[in-house]
């Protein structure tokens, strides 16, 4: 006969966690600041930052003469001076674009050597993401709030090093990891994404995604209470509906309307159907925010409107192995 030690029961208030999840900020500084502020505003003790943290472009601000600059904003040329250049930089940052001031010779150098633009982007991205992390640490200083961050397909691999090096216990980079969000409730995270037309940084075949997920799910202690934080939504789930593109990467139309198709991951769908975790959280397809059920699993795509400076998120309360409540929020 073997005696089993009974685990002490955790009081409900201690077992419960409030989580704010957002994704696809794509470099929008105002959205990141709102994300950090959500901890206090919503009373969340955990902030979960989904993938596609970084911007997609660097906008040159070119000095044409002392105190005068020129830059492009959404296809339009803007003439700036010392009074307006900082406002332009902030507008660009809030819209999800990095900026870099440079003289005409430097600008011409990059125009003549497009192969070196990636190095410029990498440098500006690293500097910006580090500044964001320092901002979060300052704003959350003295609070118990934890931030978990995972990448998306648009995030260069270099972002991993920045987040790992500067998180200092406040922000934890969790690609490929399993963490406990609440007692007995684990979360796995990955930014692995199926192949897209855009040839982005973290695209993999369905078999590679399947193997990556299995390595993580095999480590789950209680799969039925687990949370999957996976950037790409499951295939054909209504969370992955996107405009259908032709070979020219232009949106296909029929009878004057956009054609759409499911573009999520088959491997992710299989993992959800087979494991039946409590909850899955996604981003990637900005237009397909919402929630569905797949078997007993609640699946959520939070969506994104980063270009308008609107932060879309979902407020989740979990505890005692259950999803107690959730609510989509925006601001």
Image (spheres, helix red, strand yellow):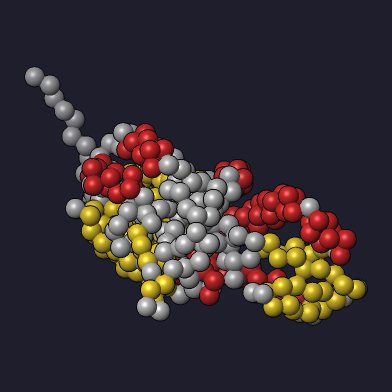
Q: Give the position of the N terminus as an image quadrant.
A: top left
Residue displayed at 16% across by 28% down: 4
Q: Position of residue 195 (x, y in %)?
A: 45, 49
In the image as oriented, which residue stretches furthest toward the left?
A: 1
Q: Position of residue 148 (x, y in %)?
A: 46, 50
Q: Please name whichever residue, 209 or 67, is drawn nearer the observer in this view of the structure.
A: 209
Residue displayed at 46% across by 63% down: 245
Q: Please name whichever residue, 114 or 249, is drawn nearer the observer in this view of the structure.
A: 249
Residue displayed at 38% across by 56% down: 263
Left/right placement of residue 33 relative to residue 49 reads: right
Please give the count of numbered marks on the rendered protein. 0
Left/right placement of residue 323 relative to residue 136 reads: left
Image: 277 above or below 298? above
Image: 251 above or below 14? below
Residue displayed at 88% across by 61% down: 105
Q: Position of residue 300 (x, y in %)?
A: 33, 60
Image: 307 above or below 12? below
Q: Quadrant of residue 260?
A: bottom left
In this orientation, does residue 316 appear? no
Q: Position of residue 49 (x, y in %)?
A: 47, 56
Left/right placement of residue 94 relative to residue 224 reads: right
Q: Quadrant of residue 264?
A: bottom left
In the image as oriented, which residue stretches furthest toward the right?
A: 66
Q: Please name whichever residue, 143 or 63, is drawn nearer the observer in this view of the structure.
A: 63
In this orientation, does residue 161 appear? yes
């Amino acid at each position: 006969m073997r005696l089993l030690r009974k685990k002490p029961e955790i009081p409900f208030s201690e077992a419960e966690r409030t989580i704010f999840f957002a994704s696809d900020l794509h470099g929008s500084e105002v959205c990141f600041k709102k994300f950090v502020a959500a901890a206090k505003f919503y009373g969340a003790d955990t902030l979960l930052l989904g993938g596609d943290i970084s911007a997609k472009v660097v906008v040159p601000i070119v000095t044409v003469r002392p105190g005068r600059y020129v830059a492009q904003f959404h296809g339009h040329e803007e003439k700036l001076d010392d009074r307006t250049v900082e406002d332009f930089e902030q507008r660009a940052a809030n819209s999800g674009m990095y900026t870099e001031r440079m003289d005409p010779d430097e600008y011409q150098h990059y125009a003549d050597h497009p192969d070196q633009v990636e190095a410029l982007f990498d440098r500006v991205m690293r500097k910006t993401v580090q500044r964001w992390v320092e901002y979060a640490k300052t704003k959350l200083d003295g609070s118990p709030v934890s931030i978990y961050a995972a990448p998306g397909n648009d995030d260069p691999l270099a972002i991993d090093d920045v987040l790992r090096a500067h998180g200092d216990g406040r922000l934890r980079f969790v690609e490929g990891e399993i963490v406990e969000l609440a007692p007995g409730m684990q979360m796995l995270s990955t930014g692995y994404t199926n192949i897209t037309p855009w040839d982005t940084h973290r695209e993999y075949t369905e078999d590679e995604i399947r193997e990556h997920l299995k390595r993580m799910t095999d480590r789950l202690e209680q799969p039925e209470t687990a949370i999957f934080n996976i950037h790409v939504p499951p295939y054909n789930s209504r969370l992955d509906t996107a405009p259908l593109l032709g070979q020219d990467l232009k949106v296909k139309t029929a009878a004057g309307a956009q054609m759409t198709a499911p573009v999520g991951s088959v491997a992710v769908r299989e993992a959800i159907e087979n494991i039946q975790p409590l909850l899955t959280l996604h981003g990637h397809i900005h237009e397909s925010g919402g929630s569905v059920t797949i078997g007993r699993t609640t699946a959520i795509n939070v969506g994104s409107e980063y270009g308008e400076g609107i932060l879309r998120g979902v407020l989740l309360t979990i505890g005692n192995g259950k999803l107690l409540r959730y609510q989509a929020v925006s601001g």
